[in-house]
Image (cartoon, rainbow, N blue to C red):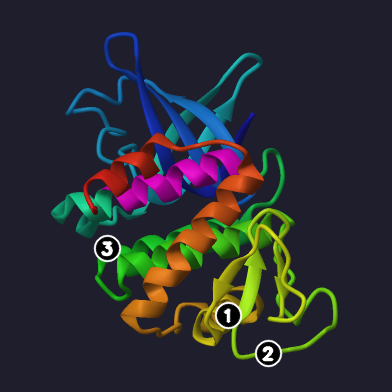
Amino acid sequence: MTFSSDAIVLKITKTGESDRLLTLLTRDRGIIKAFAKAADRPKNKLHMSTNLFCYGRFTFYEGVKSTKVEECDLNETFYGLQSDIGKLALGQYFNELMTEAAPVETDATEYLRLLLNSLFFLANDRIHPRILKSLFEMRLASLIGYMPSLVGCKECGEYETETMFFNVSTGELFCNACKGTGTKQLSLDTVSAMRHIVFSDFEKLFSLSVTENTANALEPVTEKYLLNILKRSFRTLDFYKSINN
């Protein structure tokens, strides 16, 4: 049978002489894999629409053993990512995270929304990549069911003290008096940024504005928190960091 869904290409694996095996994030069915026959040939109708980051309305044929791409009405290529290797690497990291964390065989509207908006802001230089990376990591952690506990101190409920402490292993916030071992000291600006990422409506998510110092403090916290949840490393992250150190 055939079905259609909005989808974005997360990963391409070449198979045979000219076929592509695509990993896609679809709105209606989450992560799927589908073959694009002869798409590696420049004259093939699927050649341009099955590249990395291509987003559009895909029509699939679902067979007994495999799924194939029949056609695609292309909407966006995020061409701006190609202009800078750092942006390209970060975009690939976002894709790899989605491949790992997004659901399978179920609605993935919120995951697709997060990825598309993040790639748009990245491609068009609307938000500093370091801030965007933290936005993506912590919002994704919340989407997959690991929203950190940031309302107040886990022990006493104190909303704010001069400095706060965050446990990246448990996602819990502590005040100065209740901090324990394994916590990282955070400024109130960093805590406020984390609260914005976790609690704001999606329409306000990308309005986050922080100083360079806060962005520098926020990035390792969101990264470590998400990687601790997923229990793995990412080669795209390693590459991104290698060109930004």
Q: Residues within 10 Å of mark 3 (few under 14, many from 20)?
A: many
For the point 50% across and 55% down, the residue is 223
Tag count? 3
Instruction: Identify residue type, mark 3.
Output: Ala
Residue 62 horizontal/vertical position (percent): 61, 26
User: Camera-side residue: 214 or 108?
Assistant: 214
For the point 43% across and 50% down, the residue is 94
1 or 2: tag closer to the N-terminus = 2
Q: Is residue 54 visible?
A: no
Residue 191, numbered label: 1
Residue 123, numbered label: 3
Query: In the displayed structure, would residue 74 be above or below residue 191?
Result: above
- Element type at marker 3? helix
For the point 24% across and 54% down, the residue is 244
Query: In the displayed structure, would residue 159 be above or below residue 46?
Result: below
Q: Main secondary structure of the magenta part?
A: helix
Q: Is residue 90 magenta?
A: yes
User: Camera-side residue: 207 or 172?
Assistant: 172
Residue 147 horizontal/vertical position (percent): 71, 64
- Element type at marker 2? loop
Marks 3/2: CA–CA distance = 36 Å
3 or 2: tag closer to the N-terminus = 3
Closer mark to the observer between disc 1 and disc 2 = 2
For the point 45% across and 82% down, the residue is 208
